[in-house]
Image: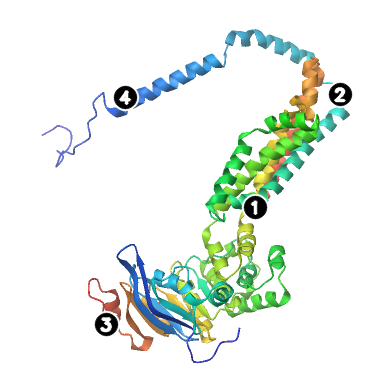
Amino acid sequence: MTDGGAAPARVYAEPISPWWSTGRLRFVAILLAVTAFYAVSWHLAQVSPSKLASGLPKMASWARKAWPPATDELPVLLRRAAETVAMAAIGTTAAALLALPVCALAARNVTPSMAVYYPVRWFLNALRGIDSFVFALLFVAAVGLGPFAGMLGVALHTWGSTAKLWAEAIENVPPGPLEAASATGASRVKVLSFALLPDVAPSMVSVVLFWWEFNVRASTVLGVVGAGGIGQELKNSMDLLDFPRLLTIILIILVMVTVIDHLSQLLRRRLE
Amino acid sequence: MSPPGNGGTAIRAEGLVKTYGHDVRAVADVSFAVAPGEFVAVLGPSGAGKTTLFRCLTGLTRPDGGSVSMHGRELGRLHGRALRSARREIALIFQQFNLIRRLSAVQNVLAGRLAVVPTWRVLLRRFAAPDRQLALSCLDRVGMLDRAYARADQLSGGQQQRVAIARALAQEATVILADEPVASLDPESAASVLETLRAVAAAGVAVIASLHQVHLAMSYADRIVALRAGRIVEDAPVGRVDAQAIERIYERNGEAA
């Protein structure tokens, strides 16, 4: 008899794994692969703490020079900020309008045929895969400098993203109400508009608000490639090393993005 | 709205056969007819073929053999417009109610009018006054008028199922097929739903409901049709179904009678 407690009635077999077991070997292999990945990434990213150490005092001196922020050009800068918000708003709205007819084709449960579904999905993925910054770069070359190029860039990228998220919202709708509505003998258009739309409309609006908010943030950099908005002023100031003006611009961006974020969140919360 | 009233047949199944795969006979040679105003309860253990029978009756599943006819018109021979208009006379009631949750009760009842309302009215959600009045009167008939403007997802299960019955009435269906209409309801709600179905039948609609509880079938239906292994093993008015017959339906390994 053993010393601790009652002897168990039977001995239960447990799996024994030797040190060379496949599980352990796999663990070591994964560890090595991850380490190698970070080592290569560290090299490729040219990480250099010493450069950061020598660069930080430079930034600190800029910060000192930047105070107080410049206010003489405030009206112009505010106008540029408004351009950014407008370009995001119109771009997002155009994207939503374009996404509306496409999203039903890209949703498995309502698409008329898989022969339509797959090409539409590929197309949307392509739009999503190219950032609005890249589109803006192309449009600046095609339609010239200014916020219109930025708006087009925002619209194309957001089109793909919005349609994909909408299609996913449609796919998550319970099939029962749709089945019940079509069982009354109603046509497809009637069923979709009457039984599907009320279910997905709130999440569709929520998606659009999210992308508007996201695009306001993303649009602040579009000016760097000449696609209008506050980003253009940001780049000018940086090129001229005009730090008080730069600080003003950064503060405007911060206030603008915070206000839009809160507004969008407020609206989205009211949708439920 | 007006009950057919003639003593004929609302829906008739003849020699229905449905086989899944090579040898799974879900429904084997099922024939029965239901008259307007009759409330038939379909009983049977799980896997007896109740759901397949219902799917064949509604046309969601095409039977391998046999036929279904509505008021003398065989559904298998109808196409296009004629088939749609025949289907319109069959309304479905589901176990999970299947209301559009964000719409009000009365809008859900108006869904029963979708097939006949012009598309632009559906798109703009502007139903004509007669349709709206009809929807309200249907809600009145199922005792849900006071909740007409409540959102569907704020109603209890039993209330939602009564709204679904009102939707069937708004569809002006002459046959209501209810697949397990009370299976997910508490006893009190189940009673009110079956009461409503009985009242609807009394007004001239043929009601066919599959039920799990024998006592509910016995107290609300006019007639029992029992399935076992895809065949009808009992088809009799409630008054003539006794305890022995019930045992036969559910007995574990007896042969079908």
Q: Which chain carries label 4?
A: A
Looking at the rendered structure, the secondary structure element under dot 1 is helix
Residue lying at the far left in this picture: please name it.
A1
- Residue A202 is labelled as 1
- Residue B244 is labelled as 3
Image side of residue A166 versus residue A87, left or right: left
Residue type, label 3: Gln
Looking at the rendered structure, the secondary structure element under dot 3 is helix
Residues A244 and B73: in front is B73
Q: Quadrant of residue A161?
A: top right
- Residue for badge 2: A71
| Mark in front: 1 vs 2 | 1
Per the model, the C-alpha gap separating discs 3 and 1 is 55 Å
Pinpoint residue B175: horizontal percent, then vertical percent: 51, 79
Q: In which quarter of the image is residue B19?
A: bottom left
Q: In this view, does B198 lie above or below A63?
A: below
Per the model, the C-alpha gap separating discs 2 and 4 is 64 Å
* Position of the N terminus of chain A by quadrant: top left
| Mark in front: 2 vs 4 | 4
